[in-house]
Amino acid sequence: MSIMDTTRCRRTAVIGGVALAAACAAGSAVGAAANPIIIQPNPVAPGGTISVFDGGNCDFPSTGTVTFTGGGSVAIPSISISPLQNMIGGTGPVPANATPGTYQVSLTCTTSGGHTEGPFTGTLKVASGASTGVNPTGGAKTGDGASLTRPGGLAEGVALVLIGGGAWFFLRKRRVSA
């Protein structure tokens, strides 16, 4: 690459960076819509347990309530939410006799200063039959450790790391001839 090409690339990168910064500023000035609340599992079977999280909408730490409307004659009880590892949420039961159907979910937070945020809304589907949520069993399927027991397995990994490091070193030192 010649010096002229290098200058042209740098100029394009600067112009592109300015354009990206302007687009980001314009996007944040418009005002962001609320994130969707997280409801897991969804759909859920009657008698199941659900977890509801704020989706990052509430100031941390906050407390609050999740309420459910619609669906059928049997009401889903409210869930109290509280801070949980960088999120705000809680879990609660779906009554075993809950009518299958769609329920509107409303999440409202209250900050430590007493300020109310929300309501943030979502939809929960109570389906007849088993929940479609994933219930993992057994160990994680991440491999059987064969590289540690097979002759040469560990050496192959070390060799790949050394080759990659050597290639990086030589490419970093390479100079463009003018």
Image (cartoon, rainbow, N blue to C red):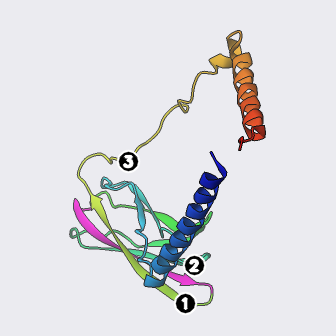
Q: Earlier in the sequence, mark 2 or mark 1?
A: 2
> Crowding at label 3, few (<14), some or many (≥20) Cα neighbours within 10 Å?
some
The residue labelled by disc 1 is: 115
Q: Judge from the rendering whether residue 17 lies leftward or rightward of residue 128; answer left or right.
A: right
Percent coordinates x, y for residue 122 in the rendering: 34, 69
Q: Residue furthest top?
A: 151
Q: Residue furthest bottom?
A: 114
The residue labelled by disc 3 is: 133
Residue 59 marker = 2
* The stretch drawn in magenta includes residue 99: yes
Residue type, label 1: His
Residue 47 marker = none
Percent coordinates x, y for residue 139 in the rendering: 55, 31
Please tell me whether the stretch drawn in magenta is mainly helix, strand or loop.
strand
Q: Quarter of the image holding residue 99? A: bottom left
* The stretch drawn in magenta includes residue 7: no
120 relative to 174, above or below: below
Nearer to me, 61 or 130: 61
- For the residues bearing labels 2 and 1, Cβ distance under 8 angstroms: yes
Residue type, label 2: Asp
Q: Judge from the rendering whether residue 147 lies leftward or rightward of residue 56; answer left or right.
A: right
Q: Quarter of the image holding residue 146? A: top right
The residues tagged by marks 2 and 1 sit, at their Cα atoms, a distance apart of 10 Å
- For the residues bearing labels 1 and 3, Cβ distance under 8 angstroms: no
Q: Residue at x 62, y 55 (%)?
A: 4
Quadrant where the C terminus lies?
A: top right
The secondary structure type at the circle numbered 2 is loop
The secondary structure type at the circle numbered 3 is loop
Q: Earlier in the sequence, mark 1 or mark 3?
A: 1
Percent coordinates x, y for residue 108 in the rendering: 45, 80
Q: Which residues are magenta?
A: 98-112
Discs 2/3, front: 2
